Image (cartoon, helix red, strand yellow):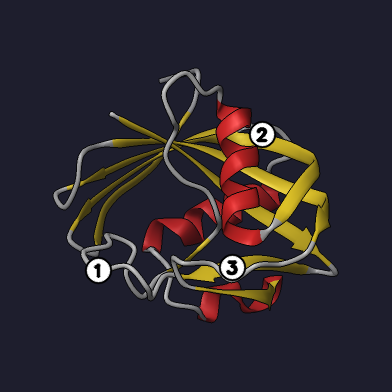
Amino acid sequence: MLQTTLCYIEKDGKYLMLHRVSKKNDVNRDKWIGVGGHFLEGEAPEECLLREVREETGYTLDRWQFRGILTFISDAQAPEIIFLYTADRFHGEPVLCDEGTLEWVEKDRIGELNLWEGDKVMFRLMEERTGTFSLKLRYQGDTLLEARELSPEE
């Protein structure tokens, strides 16, 4: 399984969103997502988080919170385990991102963007939960076939 991080940086009631328009053959092409990426060999999740955020945004995170695990199953790529974070303190100067366009988006407008359908479930859980959660998302193409929050009772 691929291992990646995903971070939603918060400021003034907005999330920093990445509109993925630059890479060819990108499973996220034209979607709006947070920032993050693949682990390098030997990296811990937080090391990957900090490196990817710095590379894609120019920001250094000063405070972040682990929100949960997303299991992303798709017929378009290998299965992926995503370590999900939010961050609300950072410093640095923004840089151009080679994966797309970065934009601060009001949280109440996120649902208007071209998101993965499962991301709408994820945003709802991030809003409702103060603790961590585990969410399994299974897709065929862009069609969400399963979105299931996994709980200890299962």
Q: Which residue is drawn at 81% across and 51% down?
A: 88
Camera-side mark, 2 or 3: 3
User: Which numbered marker is on residue 24?
Assistant: 1
Q: Mark 3 belongs to which amino acid? A: Met
To which residue does mark 3 refer? 17
User: Which numbered marker is on residue 66?
Assistant: 2
Residue 120 vertical position relative to residue 65 in the rendered view, above or below: below
The percent coordinates of residue 29 (x first, y second) are 32, 69
Give SS at disc 3.
strand
Cα separation, mark 3 vs mark 1, equals: 19 Å
Residue 90 vertical position relative to residue 46 in the rendered view, above or below: below
The percent coordinates of residue 150 (x first, y second) are 44, 30
Please name whichever residue, 140 or 40, is drawn nearer the observer in this view of the structure.
Answer: 40
Q: Which residue is drawn at 76% across and 45% down?
A: 61
Give SS at disc 1.
loop
Cα separation, mark 1 vs mark 2, equals: 30 Å
Q: Mark 1 belongs to which amino acid? A: Lys
